[in-house]
Amino acid sequence: MFLDLSECIEKKYFKNVYDVKLCDDGSAWPVRFSDKLFSVYNVVEGRRVRSCCASGVYIDLITNSDFIDLYVDILSFARDFAYFDLYIDDVFVETLGREPVEDLDEKVSFQLNYTHVNGKTVGDGKRQRISIYLPHLVDIRIKAIEVEDGCISESSGLIENTKTLLCLGDSITQGMTAKRPSSMFSVQLARKLGMNLINHGVGGYVFDEDIIDEEMGICPEIITVSYGVNDWSRYESLDIFNEKCHGFFRKLVKVYQNSKIFVITPLWTDRENELRGTGYLSEIRREIEIIAGEYEGISIINGLEMVPNMPEYFFDGVHPNDEGFAHHSINLLAQLSSKRN
């Protein structure tokens, strides 16, 4: 039995999305951005691809089916792997996927009988909450969702009225380069806070006021901001960086006057001793602290405290691996908890 994807337009089965678009071929495309923001990112092909990725998005429903099959189509990718994370009644039980992306089958099948989780056995009709996090670094379309014939399948409805967490940032906020899509700090933060997530992380991006869309109509309770490393490499002088950074925060606090804003300075990298046009990365951290600190309602979080400052916690010396993201999630949650009180 196939679920009606036309109902996805109302976000019935998709969570952590801004919108769900029904494509010409009938497939569902869960998106994180408004059309206005897509036009900003579409200027550069690499950023267009990254903005189209389903970072943080998951399929969520209550069902008594013994299986769920997803029929998928991947159009492009930011990293050449695609993995799905399965949670049953909030218990993380399985990761499925392939590397490289071309090895991923059109149908991805999940068996849903994990007796140790809640006692469910094959054919017993027991309802469970099923959450499947989609690959976070690929542009994916959901062509069909199949469940057992005659089973009951309905929206979980668990976060429709919850508060929203908006995460603004670059590749690390997007989740590069975790293999498991639920490993990224934004997902774990949203799960622990019980919030709906809108992940506006785009690899390669910088402080830019144009990526703040005042017409999106969202009212996040919490916003995290995490840029700086790409700015450090892009600009020729610290003065140019300061101008861009000021412009970003002026607009951010104006648009989101009722949000609690947390600014995370750049994490450790293995390039700390490299000198760029803007100086050393430590100077970028200091400037972010000074600039953001000028605006009321913004709290500063020291990025050096988020992930151990050792190469083994990073994929490439810049982007955390899954273990590094675990530290990031725990440490960031502790900081937010202390600063919100």
Image (cartoon, rainbow, N blue to C red):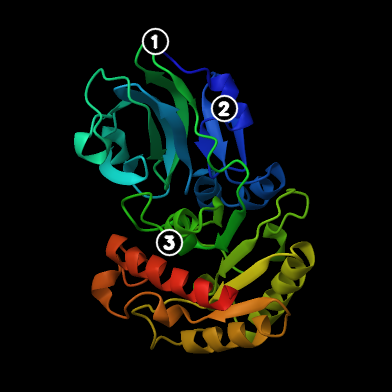
Q: Secondary structure at mark 2?
A: helix
Amino acid type shown at disc 3: Phe
Amino acid type shown at disc 1: Gly
Mark 2, residue position: 8
Expressed as whole percent of the image width and height from the top left, the position of residue 218 reads 70, 50
Alpha carbon of mark 1 to alpha carbon of mark 3: how far? 38 Å
Q: Are marks 1 and 3 in contact (CB under 8 Å)?
A: no
Front tag of 1 and 2: 1
264 to the left or right of 148: right
User: In the rendered structure, which disc, 1 or 3, sits on the residue that comes first in sequence?
Assistant: 1
Is residue 284 placed above or below 326 in the rendered structure? below
How packed mark 3 is, by other alpha carbons closer than 10 Å (few <14, some 14-19, many 20 or more), is many
User: Residue at horizontal 41%, vertical 33%?
Assistant: 74
Amino acid type shown at disc 2: Cys
Is residue 112 placed above or below 46 in the rendered structure? above
How packed mark 1 is, by other alpha carbons closer than 10 Å (few <14, some 14-19, many 20 or more), is few
User: In the rendered structure, which disc, 1 or 2, sits on the residue that comes first in sequence?
Assistant: 2
